[in-house]
Amino acid sequence: MGKNVIFTLLTMLYFFIYVVTSLNSSTDEYALLAFKSKITSDPNKVLAKNWSQGTSFCNWIGITCGTRHQRVRGLNLANMDLGGTIAREIGGLSFLRSMIIRNNNFCGFIPDEMSKLSQLREIEMQYNELNGTIPTSLGFLENLQKLNLSHNKLIGDIPYRILNLSSLVEISFGNNSLSGSLPTDICYNLPKLEMLRISVNQISGNIPPSLGTCTNLKLLSLSYNNFAGSIPMEIGNLSKLQILNLGRNNLIGSIPYEIGNSSALEYLYLHLGSNILTEFGKSNIIKQSITWSPESLGDLIALQYLDLSKNNLYGEIPRSLEKLKELVYFNVSFNELSGEIPNGGPFMNLTIDFFVGNIKLCGSSQYKVMPCKGYATSSSIKTRNLKYILPSIALVTILVIILVYLMRRHNRNTLLPAQSTSPITIKRISYYEVLNATNNFDEENLIGIGSIGKVYKEIFSDGMIAAIKVFNLDLEGANKSFYIECLILCNIRHRNLGVGIYA
Ligand SMILES: *[C@@H]1O[C@H](CO)[C@@H](O)[C@H](O)[C@H]1NC(C)=O
Ligand SMILES: *[C@@H]1O[C@H](CO)[C@@H](O)[C@H](O)[C@H]1NC(C)=O
Ligand SMILES: *[C@@H]1O[C@H](CO)[C@@H](O)[C@H](O)[C@H]1NC(C)=O
Ligand SMILES: *[C@@H]1O[C@H](CO)[C@@H](O)[C@H](O)[C@H]1NC(C)=O
Ligand SMILES: *[C@@H]1O[C@H](CO)[C@@H](O)[C@H](O)[C@H]1NC(C)=O
Ligand SMILES: *[C@@H]1O[C@H](CO)[C@@H](O)[C@H](O)[C@H]1NC(C)=O
Ligand SMILES: *[C@@H]1O[C@H](CO)[C@@H](O)[C@H](O)[C@H]1NC(C)=O
Ligand SMILES: *[C@@H]1O[C@H](CO)[C@@H](O)[C@H](O)[C@H]1NC(C)=O
Ligand SMILES: *[C@@H]1O[C@H](CO)[C@@H](O)[C@H](O)[C@H]1NC(C)=O
Ligand SMILES: *[C@@H]1O[C@H](CO)[C@@H](O)[C@H](O)[C@H]1NC(C)=O
């Protein structure tokens, strides 16, 4: 009996002490004053003037208290130009739900004591100078929904315990110096996660396929890291995904067909080179050849933004993309694409700036690429174009390709394939003869103007008619373009085609 009484008394005493301490609002004041004491820079004297002990801390600027008891619920000191460290005593604000100190100059470590703030739902510390590692103990904050530590100087791994906090909805660690890799089972315990931003760090390893199990993800931004390997097809399981930013990594392989199933996708940020991120931009990411699944992308009807620049994409731009009515940004610069640029649907409003660095593309004049006729296919060459390619006005190099209709009989050219049925002539033509025949490249003889050169009609003194293409070597890509045309013409077997190259 005595034992029971003592036990009951002890329990009551414990409970009493607990209630008193937890309701003791002066612990909050103490914590806030300690916090203030670590603030070494307050140019606008906000805290210096306002946080004075004469008034209730619930009236202090940036403080919100609960209505029932006078305990601090919210601390919002955003954009106040404050500098200093975060006092460990912050851990005494045991009723704190929201801690917002973004856009200041807080430095030093994130105190471990924050793990005592078990009510905390929201942490916004972005745009400060915080350094050190992300405390693993933040993984004890079982109510945490939003954690934004972006734009600081944090180092080390992303603690696994944090990526295992099932309450989290938004995680932002962008623009720090975090390293390590993502856990392979990253999404096994993040059922509510809608945003994961870790762009601009030094995270390496593969993109874990288990990200596909974060089925509520709307935004996934991993750009500007050192991710390697391929893009997991499981990303295609993220049916709510609106923004996917994987640019500026070292990803290889193909763009998974499954991504076409994310019908909510608005931004496919595969800026893999000029950095995967747009505001970010430089070199590339997907180093090996990437093939794409045209039909699949054509299903992304909500797609507005597609940046595939600086990859190694090859093949043709699928016409099915003309279906993407919402598409306003489509950048495929610096790839190996060939064939005709579509000109229907959203393509009508695009300019050459979206296609540069694909020397094999052709299309309408709005894109300032070479016209598709007359170069890309042998059938167009069968038209009456005779083509000479000459050095630029700058006379850097002279090479000539001649397409001729011949009037004279000649010996069979032994270099030509056996199926050639008619005789052919190879003619040597000097630059001066060309100058002469075009009357010094007179505009009268101009047949056509392309993106990188002009084509003139020539009548030589012996009556031979030819077309001369003059490349402007001052333009980027002209050299390559010339080279490709040579290759194409060299490979075309046609009885009326002869090739001569002069340098
Ligand atoms: C409240 O807390 C302060 C500081 O922690 C302490 O000095 C004070 O004695 C406490 N008051 C009560 C009634 O417990
Ligand atoms: C502190 O700021 C709050 C909110 O701006 C204001 O209501 C209060 O009067 C200020 N207190 C002092 C002592 O300046
Ligand atoms: C972290 O920041 C503090 C305060 O600016 C500085 O004294 C300390 O050297 C920094 N530590 C590291 C590891 O950069
Ligand atoms: C992850 O969370 C689950 C459920 O909360 C827990 O059972 C497991 O131990 C946690 N794992 C780690 C490594 O913290
Ligand atoms: C975190 O802060 C950055 C910078 O202000 C912002 O762009 C981002 O949307 C924030 N993330 C979340 C999850 O709130
Ligand atoms: C990252 O932060 C640094 C300064 O902390 C800034 O200069 C840089 O522009 C930021 N990068 C991006 C991509 O936001
Ligand atoms: C995720 O995608 C893979 C392959 O695309 C598929 O095999 C798997 O069943 C999907 N998982 C879920 C949960 O939908
Ligand atoms: C894409 O979604 C359709 C139904 O919307 C489904 O039948 C198909 O299996 C999915 N494909 C992939 C690769 O997930
Ligand atoms: C397309 O991407 C390239 C390389 O990333 C960039 O230089 C160019 O400005 C972009 N074009 C447009 C229209 O944004
Ligand atoms: C092209 O741009 C004009 C003006 O910005 C707009 O009215 C038109 O709808 C656009 N066309 C397409 C196909 O996007």
Image (cartoon, rainbow, N blue to C red):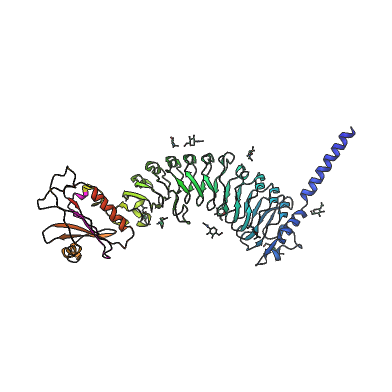
Where's residue 87, x and y in %?
70, 57
Q: Residue furthest right?
A: 2
Q: Is residue 335 visible?
A: yes
Query: In terms of image quadrants, where is residue 446?
Result: bottom left
Classify the position of the N terminus by image quarter: top right
Is 474 left, or right, of 247 in this rendering?
Answer: left
Q: Judge whether residue 413 is colored magenta.
A: no
User: 349 above or below 432?
Assistant: above
Q: Position of residue 96 (x, y in %)?
A: 69, 51
Q: Quadrant of residue 441?
A: bottom left
Tell me the magenta residue range: 380-403
Residue 347 drawn at (x, y percent): 35, 52
In which of the image's four quarters is ligand 6 placed?
bottom right
**Percent position of residue 274, x then y:** 44, 54
Residue 148 seen in this snapshot? no
Comparing 472 with 300, the one in front is 472
Q: Quadrant of the C terminus?
A: bottom left
Say which quarter of the image contains residue 349: bottom left
Q: Relative to residue 129, is residue 52 drawn left or right?
A: right
Q: Residue at x 38, y 53 (%)?
A: 334
